[in-house]
Image (spheres, rainbow, N blue to C red):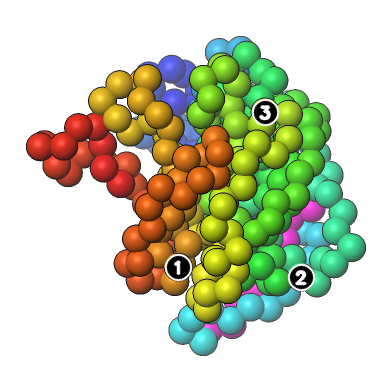
Amino acid sequence: GDFCQAGRHDLLLSDGDGLAAETWEGQELWRSPEVPVFLITISAEPLGGARRIYAFIGERKVEEQQNVRGHVGQRCVADELIALDGLSGRVEARLKLPEEDDMDLMRNWDVSNETGRLVSDAKVDICVRQWRKDCGGGGRDVWAYDADLNELWHACVDPPYGHHNAVHMLDLNGDGRDEVLAGGTLLSADGETIAVHDMAGELEQIRGAGHYDAVVAGRFGEDEESAPVAFLMAGSAGVYVIDPLTGRTRAVHRIGHAQWGLPCKVRDDMAGQQV
């Protein structure tokens, strides 16, 4: 990504010795001794000339896990989140992740699918979320932070959100600040609940559903003035198409076990994008 310099895409590499930025020709731009243990994400927009890089580090707990092929490995639950300057690799902020009373139910930490604009002048604010055993791999809690990892708010949603693509930051009401769509719940830039999916009760009763695996939202019409819409991929419940600002269901597609969605243009005879 262009985390060092706008318009120039470099490589961000992680190994057992730390985190490094290199050009495609192999020239090292910087190296940090911080060793990421899970996800690394880059801010959607630069701050002060370079993008922020967020990485989970440290070990709060390590446990064995078995994958779908039956192989046993180790999973590390991170202890901290750090924010690095993309130009220099300097650690700008460090956050001790929230303490959970039921850490035995925690699979891992995660972040929102993208960074957004909650209080900052650029899309650099970020949400921390969970992977929990009692939520089918999803979670309920959302913590919002600015680019210096100052906590902005904490919210809890019900029903749970699902996998990585189930928590998004985007401006749906057009006020210039981003809302947070966490599964079937829309939260304001201040962490207040705006709307909850009106068929959430049905979702919780369907075997193989229970949380929203992924969500896709935006204005998919021909212009930016078109009404926002959200597609909630809800596992065995299929896909709910809703008005995200009210939670009202517009359509339901029973298509099997839905886990992902992608806005794209597949029909030239139809206006806007399809999902």
**Left or right, residue 143 beside residue 12:** right
Q: Amino acid at mark 2?
A: Leu
Type of secondary structure dominating the magenta stretch: strand
Please report whichever mark, 2 or 1, sits nearer to the chain's N-terminal start. 2
Callout 2 crowding tier (Cα within 10 Å): few <14, some 14–19, many ≥20: some
**Image location (x, y in percent) of residue 255:** 32, 67
Residue 76 magenta-drawn?
yes
- Please tell me which residue is depicted at 51% across the width and 29% down the height of the picture: 172
Q: For this rendering, which residue is in front, 75 or 126?
A: 126
Q: Is there CB contact under 8 Å for labels 3 and 1?
A: no
Residue bearing the label numbered 1: 237
Segment colored magenta:
71-80
Task: Tell me how far mark 2 sits from mark 1, CA to CA.
Answer: 25 Å
Please report whichever mark, 3 or 1, sits nearer to the chain's N-terminal start. 3
Residue bearing the label numbered 2: 105
Check residue 189 in the rendering and tell me which mark sits there, or answer none: 3
Check residue 41 in the rendering and tell me which mark sits there, or answer none: none
* Viewer-side label of 3, 1: 1
- Please tell me which residue is depicted at 79% across the width and 35% down the height of the picture: 153
* Viewer-side label of 2, 1: 1
Callout 3 crowding tier (Cα within 10 Å): few <14, some 14–19, many ≥20: many
**Image location (x, y in percent) of residue 236:** 44, 71
Q: Amino acid at mark 3?
A: Ala
